[in-house]
Amino acid sequence: MTTDINPVALGVFIFFFVLVTIMGFVAARWRRPATMAHIDEWGLGGRNFGTWITWFLVGGDFYTAYTVIAVPALVYAVGAYGFFALPYTILVYPFVFMVMPLLWKRAKDHGYVTAGDVVHGQFGSRGLELAVAVTGVIATMPYIALQLVGMTAVFKALGLHGELPLAVAFIILALYTYSAGLRAPALIAFVKDIMIYIVVIVAVAMIPSKLGGYANVFQSASDAFAAKGSGSILLGSNQYVAYASLALGSALAAFMYPHTLTGIFASASGNTIRKNAVLLPAYTLLLGLLALLGYMGHAAHLTLASPTDVVPALFQTLFSSWFAGFAFAAIAIGALVPAAVMSIGAANLFTRNFWKAYVNPDVDPAGEAKVAKLTSLVVKVGALLVILFLPTQFALDLQLLGGIWILQTLPALVFGLYTGWFRAPGLLAGWAVGFFGGTWLVWINGLKPLQAIGFGENPVTVYIGLLALAANIAVAVIINALTPARATASA
């Protein structure tokens, strides 16, 4: 991949980056309320985002810059197994349709801002609330860092080396998020998603014609996997259970993250969420097309230092400079939207479930908003430091654990929406078993998310997140059954 500066590509990139920067600052005046000194306004956009705004916002923080880079990279490296993201983004929307309107109503009726608020309101346990909040924050931090990985790949392709471009981009992001809150990524998401759609549609329409058609694309990928002795364009029979369990576990975890819940809580109504559950699968089609770029990288016979370079290298090699610049801008902006929402989600958790709960219970709405703003800056700086001073693999490993960790908050957050049978002590014990047990299994498997389970002569490999969740639920059920009903005091 060429890493010299291309003035045309860089010029186009800068134009669109400046455009969204202006939009980010303008967003502070977009649908401006009487005051922004309230966490509902700064952190949830006033709770009145309609169907289209929610569609772009949730899609924007669900399909990130790292997704655009990482999914094709995984397909390039291992083949069909990398397509697990497709079924999981199909499975997740029935879950959203059924569960999230109930969660939204609970939050709206009681003024809850975070998952921690909901859990405390349902069970009256500060311990369980803190467990959910801490899990959300530590699962989000490496996720933000990985947006920087995607942006770093773009800067590298543009010939911009060193830490300065990344630092400048995130300083700009921090400033307009501080002033506009959730309105900034919501407004920018319109531009980002339209640009990504254009890039992917043009790519899947034009690249195969430059590479001899899809038949040659698939044959080249198959030949490349055969030559290196690993990977395939079809799943092996020993991968079926791992593939399915990874897809299911990822689907259940996806809307437990603070950033996706922030988009849900910012919606205007339960029907808005249901409509989005119907409309959002359009992004799955986009993701499937995007994943095919991994196979196209083999057909183009690219020379790559890393699989994460496959998408930038394709655009550099096969398109004009101006379109490459446009594509790189789309990917970089695709990092800004989710990074902003993630930092806001983490800041809301810290403010409501730590600062207000333990430091200043009497803090007023303006004070909450101020703490959340400052925390969002700290979160972004922390993510930037991870990328600058720690190996990228560190962020990758933590994000891998993040999915397993955040999945363990599902029982506490969701079960109480449907039944009053569960109580805090059992749910807290279940969370601890799932959180620490899942972490231990990942550790002993060499930081891999899969665990082999023996069934006679035919062991199967299962996603550790699901195993940890099963243990979590089992412990919660057993302890709840053995604990007297009067044990409802704060854990």
Image (tube, rainbow, N blue to C red):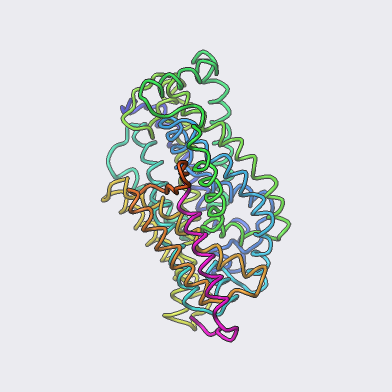
Q: Residue furthest front?
A: 456
Q: Main SS of the magenta segment?
A: helix
Residue 464, given in percent of the width and then of the height, sits at: 45, 52
Residue 106 against residue 99 in the figure, above or below:
below
Q: Which residues are magenta?
A: 462-491
Residue 6 against residue 241 in the figure, above or below:
above
Residue 216, given in percent of the width and then of the height, sits at: 50, 15
Residue 14, given in percent of the width and then of the height, sits at: 43, 37
Residue situated in front as seen by the camera: 28 or 190: 190
Q: Quadrant of the N terminus?
A: top left
Question: Which image quarter: residue 194?
Answer: top right
Q: Is residue 414 toward the left or the right of residue 178 in the image?
A: right
Residue 202, given in percent of the width and then of the height, sits at: 56, 26
Number of numbered discs: 0
Residue situated in front as seen by the camera: 411 or 350: 411
Q: Is residue 164 toward the left or the right of residue 297 in the image?
A: left
Q: From this viewpoint, is residue 142 visible?
A: yes
Q: Residue at x 28, y 47 (%)?
A: 391
Residue situated in front as seen by the camera: 381 or 281: 281
Q: Residue at x 57, y 59 (%)?
A: 261
Q: Magenta span has 470?
A: yes
Q: Residue furthest right?
A: 271
Q: Residue at x 44, y 74 (%)?
A: 354
Question: Which image quarter: residue 139?
Answer: bottom left
Residue situated in front as seen by the camera: 120 or 108: 120
Q: Magenta span has 70?
A: no
Q: Residue at x 66, y 69 (%)?
A: 106
Q: From this viewpoint, is residue 450 visible?
A: no
